[in-house]
Amino acid sequence: MEDDGWGAMDSYSPRTDLAIEAHEMARRKVQTVPGVVEETEEFDGIRVSRVHVQNRQGEQALGKRVGHYVTIEVPGLRRRDPDLQQRVAEQFAKEFERLLRVPENATVLVVGLGNQQVTPDALGPKVAQRLFVTRHLFQYFPELLGEGYRTVAAVSPGVLGVTGVETSEVVKGIVEHVKPDLVVAIDALASRSLNRVNATIQISDSGIQPGAGVGNKRRALDEETLGCKVLAVGVPTVVDAATIANDAMELILEKLRVSVPNNGASQIFDHFTPQEKWQLIKEVLEPLGNNLMVTPKEIDEFIDDVAEVVAQGLNLALHPSMTMEEASQLTH
């Protein structure tokens, strides 16, 4: 699971890997966040938000690096709707192409981050399995491919706890051999909102830090460490337990303020800052495990479905000549 490693608010705020959520939290303090621009569009059940972190001020306010962050929100993704999934894949391809910015003859390495044995963290490997990889075809059977297909390779490097090797070391070694023009990193994310879990896809061009989303900070995969452009794709599959507890406490206090004016609990907690409330919750949950993460019970079915959506979108974006029908056949 991913975080970009900047997390300035993580010590007291709900953990999130989504730039749109970081922007929402920052806007609770100021209406306009310096150095950050956001634009939103609606497409028949698909909401696309584009957050642009423009400078150091924006980085400090959001805890996200300078770059472009595209969030595709689709509540209907939680239900198995093939028509909607196809439309999401097509919209994903369009948004990905906007950030792609590499020539048609570019070499692309797709890295499926995560642990395939842990369902909420299996997105990356499952997407990598469904991609149309062509590097070997261009080397040995170039006559099989016409124009409109890029050289694509895919790998799932596993996780440190299984392989004993840092993900960044594995990826860097492959990059040095394959020499791609672009690395696409796929990973599961953490959200601060249950409404966005299993209903959101984020694309960014600022790199990725495997493991930080669940408190396991690893070396970043970005242009500085790999020497080539890096795009990150992620889907939030978990929520920090402290986030759920924090939101539940706020709802209870709000209910008490309305139904029992001047109640003792509100009088006590109204003197607490958001930071102090968050710290209290973390201390209460400490005996349960400080980084306890929660995922919906339908996660098994969802991971397979969203992996197919992301793989279809990537196949369309990376291979301009590919049709949606061909992309669907390849991912099944």
Image (cartoon, helix red, strand yellow):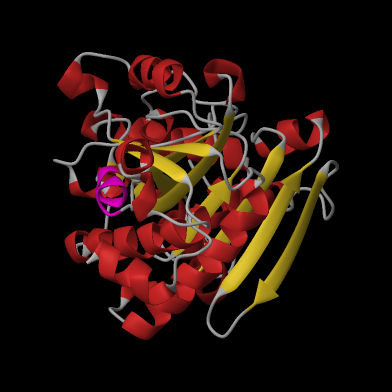
Q: How many marks?
A: 0
Assess whether residue 111 is covered by the magenta stretch.
Answer: no
Residue 36 spot, x, y in % from top left: 79, 46
Between 124 and 237, which is closer to the camera in this rendering? 124
Quadrant location of the C terminus in the rendered image: bottom left
Q: Is residue 148 left or right of residue 30?
A: left
Q: Relative to 147, say whether 186 is above or below.
A: above
Image spot of residue 8 (x, y percent): 62, 29
Q: Is residue 183 above or below residue 247?
A: above
Question: With 249 as the anchor, is 165 left or right in this view?
Answer: left
In reply to whether residue 126 is colored magenta, the answer given is yes
- Measuring 37% from the left and 39% from the top, which residue is drawn there? 135
Question: Looking at the image, which is closer to me, 112 or 331?
Answer: 331
Q: Is residue 201 left or right of residue 27?
A: left
Q: Residue at x 25, y 26 (%)?
A: 159
Image quarter hosting the N terminus = top left
Q: Would you identify the image quadrant in which residue 162 lies?
A: top left
Quarter holding residue 199: bottom left
In magenta, the rendered stretch is: 125-130
Residue 76 in sight in this render? no
Task: Measuring from the top left, give residue 262's x and y in whole percent.
Answer: 59, 63
The reply to whether residue 63 is in sight is yes
- Coordinates of residue 18 in the picture (x, y in percent): 54, 48
Vertical placement of residue 137 versus 10, above or below: below
138 and 48: which one is in front? 138
> Measuring 40% from the left and 54% from the top, which residue is drawn there?
145
